[in-house]
Image (spheres, helix red, strand yellow):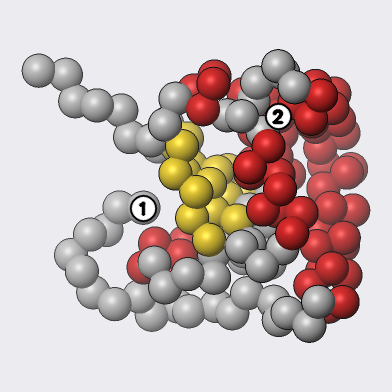
Amino acid sequence: MKEAPTPALIVYDGDCIFCQSYVRFMRLRETIGAVELLDARSADPRVARFQKQGFDLNEGMLFVFEDRIYHGDEAANLLAILSSSSSLFGRLNRALLSNRTAARLIYPLLKAGRRATLRLRGRPLIQADLDPPPDGNSGW
């Protein structure tokens, strides 16, 4: 019997209204199937594991797809390529971020917008928790 594929995983800032909207509107499930959304501010032990691996979640979202971790502009670029273009948002997202160079240039502006919005809303940056509770699971 063939094992079911591991769903894709997106780790994003749940306190950022832009991040929330982005993951809600990209319609990734239409093109790749199951996608798990994980708030980087949650107590989920995978968040701490990613941080321990050196991923700064204030510097970018994570996209785990086919056993590879994409971070920041690389994640945004692949998400734009894989997302459905059946909506206006999808077409705009693909037009802006599916080009690798454009994603590298635009992503710092998106990060700055996130930080400014968090500051205006009185929300702190994501805190690093480098000691996840042991649960015997070394995977993501």
The quarter of the picture where residue 31 lies is: top right
Residue 53 visible in the shown view: no
Alpha-carbon neighbours of circle 2 within 10 Å: few (<14), some, or many (≥20)? many
Residue type for callout 2: Ala
Horizontal and vertical percent position of residue 48: 44, 70
> x and y percent of residue 72 in the render?
69, 50
Q: Is residue 45 left or right of residue 56?
A: left
The residue identified by callout 1 is: 140
Q: Residue at x 49, y 23 (%)?
A: 32
Secondary structure at numbered mark 1: loop
Does 109 appear above or below 14?
above
Q: Nearer the viewer, residue 20 or 95?
A: 20
Please identify the quarter of the rendering in which residue 56 is found.
bottom right
Q: Please tell me whether mark 2 sits on a helix, a strand or a loop.
A: helix
Residue at point 88% right, 70% down? 116
Choose between 114 and 103: the one closer to the eye: 114
Q: Residue at x 30, y 28 (%)?
A: 5
Residue 25 percent location from the top left of the image: 68, 37
Label pair 2/1, CB-CB below 8 angstroms: no
The answer to whether 138 appears left or right of 12 in the picture is: left
Q: Which residue is mark 2?
A: 80
Residue drawn 55% across and 78% down? 128
Q: Is residue 134 above or below residue 22?
A: below
140 up-or-down from 93: above or below: below
Task: Indicate which label's residue lies in the foreground, 2 or 1.
Answer: 2
Q: Is residue 9 left or right of residue 4?
A: right
Q: Quadrant of residue 45?
A: bottom left
Give amino acid for label 1: Trp
Number of callouts: 2
Do we see residue 131 in this rendering?
yes
